[in-house]
Amino acid sequence: MAQRTHVRIPRRAGKGEIIHIKTKIDHPMESGRRLGQNGKPIPRNLIKKFFCLFNEREVFRADFDSGVAADPYLAFYFRATESGRFRLVWVAENGEKYDRSVTMEVV
Amino acid sequence: MEAKHPFQEALPGRRKVLLMCGRAFAASIPMLLLPCLAGASPRDAKKRLAALTNDVAVKKGRVTITLPKITDQGDFVPIKVAVESPMTEFDHVKAIHIVAERNPDPAVASYYLGPANGKAEISTRIRLVKTQVVVAAAVMSDGSIYVGKTHSKISTGAGGCG
């Protein structure tokens, strides 16, 4: 299955450097209001939560609603202090989870 | 440490309740008084914002929203919210809430930050169903709330209505 999650995190960072983390997930983010070809509403299908953990500690979290554009793109910042692994998790309203791990080395 | 924004000096000393703010603001922008209100009203959005922020009185300043002044792609509107903050253990942004006044569902997204972020700035893409004001509220670690607003025009053709 094609990778739905896209993540841009520098592989290496200086100690104390504030890095830019870019994330995106392919997802229609259907609000349940759009009408399909047959005139019936397309079922609601939303990603509701996003988590970013670093070395198993939560460092950033987001709640999405229907106002977030399809294929949700989200970029935020992180202060690099030690090497470790990022874990990014997207959770859909229907319980589906999407997981992505990226390691970063701090020099 | 906290520099007083010029706005704050000019404002009256009393703090406005969030719901009253919405009405005054809506009245000051003629474009928002369109009769075709298919989406929520600024009042609904303010109620939603008040619920998100526990009705704490808000301050102006520190929040900058970057949003296109006009776009014909209401489904993909890039937005950046930056909040001035040292992001230390004792002084940081805890949450940023984005509310779109005239979307059917005014609550767009909420972001929860901490000192680990280093910078209180998020970039994302949102949906705006019609021309409206977008509000971003930043909740600080000391409980204070700063609010910023920006207006965006969604044009469906060569500058038509809404």
Image (cartoon, helix red, strand yellow):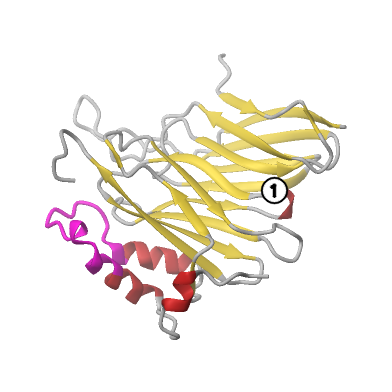
Q: Nearer the viewer, residue A43 or B130?
A: B130
Residue shown at the point (64%, 27%) measured from the top left: A8
Q: Chain of mark 1?
A: B
Res. B121 in view: yes
Highlighted range, magenta: B25-43
Res. A47 in view: no
Residue shown at the point (44%, 81%) measured from the top left: B15
- Check disc 1 and report the residue beneath it: B117
Indicate the quadrant containing the N terminus of chain A: top left, top right, bottom left or bottom right. top right
Residue A42 in the image: state x and y as whole percent.
31, 32
B59 w.r.t. A38: above or below: below
B117 w.r.t. B26: above or below: above
Residue B36 sits inside the magenta stretch: yes
Residue shown at the point (53%, 29%) measured from the top left: A25
Q: Amino acid at mark 1?
A: Asn
Q: Secondary structure at mark 1?
A: helix
Residue B46 in the image: state x and y as whole percent.
37, 66
